[in-house]
């Protein structure tokens, strides 16, 4: 096992990794930008190293500075968290070239499964249901139009190299395809350094459901069940729960088996998430794979009792999976609400000094955060302030517990989306489990 791990990230995920390492007896190194000098992850780590100014390109995405910090502190491995360099195959490759273990999948895994167009091809080869679309990146808008006519409108253009809604356009008519193609291409290039985009059939009113997987270096694979991630705005998730309220046991089993088939076929290693769209008839189709730990991993941990971050570290150290699929048991229901520093009505970011930060507690409540009273949230990074996770015996109990936890939360000095999360908890359709990816539009209309 590693003696020292460097966390190449910030915020709540950096704190989360530090906690896992501490419980495993592993010393930790935090890296931080000048804007994050007072961050909680800097306080919690055994060592901390400044890697540059606030701009992420000069700090959290600066491979040379991060590797220098690892060399100076004698870190044996690097955990990338999520975002920044987490799905950068080049970073994983450079780590290997200098003898530092990258805690995650192999560079080749990231190149294939982290590229949406290539991942579609891999899923097709593995016999996993895939939405009709282009076999690879589009050459030009003429090819896009030809495929759209064959597939049938509406269709969606997506960036091959990234996610989060960037480089993505829904197209309903032939007339709008040209402009949408160039907009998606430009946005993809600006966001991910690659202008490659692909096209696929757009599913109206789908549910977004993903499967957490773990795989060791010897080819053993298990899945840890599904997470429902349909409540999102502009493809950014707001709330997640596990298990899904809509899946039957038969479909749940088939989705888990499909995820495992894909992972085995791709010879994927470490933790990852296989994402599907599920239509109104409960037919599921593969859309992408995230080759990293997900923001919403705590809901899986809550219902399985399996620490996903510890498993990442163990698997990267060369350990075998210590469980079979039959050993994975699902208990109760979990919900995660992402608390963001933003206006709950306009979604405009709200950085600034936090003057009050009262967290919820009690049975079945967990909070992952790197914020505290007196901390100033910088404007340079994402707006995530905290994740409130609850676990109950039933979905109804989990909803009641989350409602109580949100009511206990008091954050002052900045605006947050807590009022929106309270509305979701009280919504009759949400309570019945009747919602799709368009659910949030009733509270937050698209611009």
Image (tube, rainbow, N blue to C red):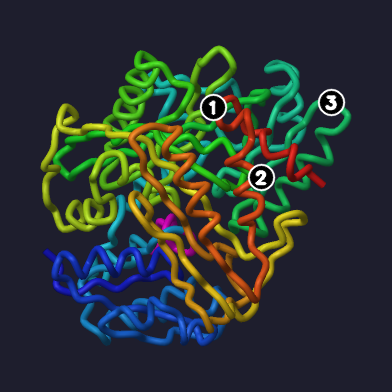
The disc at residue 330 is none
Residue that carries the numbered disc 2 in the rendered image:
233
Q: Is residue 433 above or below residue 397?
A: above
- Residue lying at 51% horizontally and 79% vertically, measured from the top left: 373
The foreground one among 346 and 5 is: 346
Estimate the spatial distance between the alpha carbons at disc 1 and disc 3, rounded to whole Å.
35 Å
Estimate the spatial distance between the alpha carbons at disc 2 and disc 3, rounded to whole Å.
26 Å
Q: Are marks 2 and 1 in contact (CB under 8 Å)?
A: no
- Residue lying at 22% horizontally and 32% vertically, measured from the top left: 329
Magenta extent: 83-91
Residue that carries the numbered disc 1 in the rendered image:
433
Give left or right: position of 415 versus 315. right
Give left or right: position of 51 versus 417. left
What SS does tag 1 mark? Answer: loop
Residue that carries the numbered disc 3 in the rendered image:
174
Of label 2 and label 1, which has the lower sequence position? 2
What SS does tag 3 mark? Answer: helix
Of label 1 and label 3, which has the lower sequence position? 3
Q: Are marks 1 and 3 in contact (CB under 8 Å)?
A: no
- Label 1: how many Cα within 10 Å (few below 14, some 14–19, many 20+): few
Please say whether residue 42 is one of the residues in the magenta stretch.
no
């Amino acid at each position: 096992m590693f003696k020292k791990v460097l966390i190449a990230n910030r915020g709540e995920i950096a704190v989360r990794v530090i906690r896992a390492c501490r419980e495993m007896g592993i010393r930790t190194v935090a890296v931080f930008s000048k804007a994050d000098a007072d961050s909680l992850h800097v306080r919690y780590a055994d060592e901390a190293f400044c890697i540059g100014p606030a701009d992420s390109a000069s700090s959290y995405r600066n491979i040379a500075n991060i590797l220098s910090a690892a060399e100076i502190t004698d870190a044996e491995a690097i955990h990338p968290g999520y975002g920044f360099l987490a799905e950068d195959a080049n970073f994983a490759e450079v780590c290997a070239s200098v003898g530092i273990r990258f805690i995650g999948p192999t560079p080749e895994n990231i190149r294939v499964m982290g590229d949406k167009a290539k991942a579609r091809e891999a899923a097709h080869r593995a016999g996993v249901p895939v939405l009709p679309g282009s076999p690879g990146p589009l050459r030009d808008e003429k090819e896009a139009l030809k495929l759209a006519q064959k597939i049938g409108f509406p269709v969606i253009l997506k960036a091959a190299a990234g996610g989060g809604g960037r480089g993505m356009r829904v197209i309903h008519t032939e007339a709008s395809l040209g402009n949408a193609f160039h907009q998606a291409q430009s946005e993809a290039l600006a966001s991910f350094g690659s202008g490659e985009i692909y096209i696929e059939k757009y599913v109206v009113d789908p549910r977004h459901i993903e499967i957490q997987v773990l795989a060791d270096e010897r080819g053993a694979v298990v899945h840890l069940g599904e997470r429902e991630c349909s409540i999102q705005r502009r493809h950014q998730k707001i709330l997640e729960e596990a298990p899904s309220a809509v899946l039957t046991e038969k479909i749940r089993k088939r989705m888990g088996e499909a995820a495992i088939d894909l992972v085995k076929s791709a010879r994927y290693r470490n933790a990852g998430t296989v994402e599907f769209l599920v239509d109104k008839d409960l037919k599921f189709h593969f859309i992408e794979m995230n080759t990293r730990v997900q923001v919403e991993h705590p809901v899986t941990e809550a219902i399985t009792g399996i620490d996903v971050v510890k498993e990442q570290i163990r698997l990267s150290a060369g350990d075998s999976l210590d469980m079979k699929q039959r050993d994975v048991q699902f208990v109760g229901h979990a919900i995660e609400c992402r608390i963001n520093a933003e206006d709950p009505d306009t979604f405009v970011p709200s950085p600034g000094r936090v003057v009050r930060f009262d967290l919820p507690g009690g049975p079945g409540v967990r909070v992952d955060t790197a914020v505290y009273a007196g901390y100033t949230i910088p404007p340079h990074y994402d707006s995530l302030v905290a994740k409130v996770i609850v676990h109950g015996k039933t979905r109804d109990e989990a909803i009641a517990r989350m409602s109580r936890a949100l009511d206990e939360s008091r954050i002052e000095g900045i605006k947050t989306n807590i009022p929106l999360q309270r509305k979701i908890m009280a919504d009759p359709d949400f309570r019945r489990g009747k919602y799709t990816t368009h659910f949030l539009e009733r509270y937050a209309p698209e611009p």
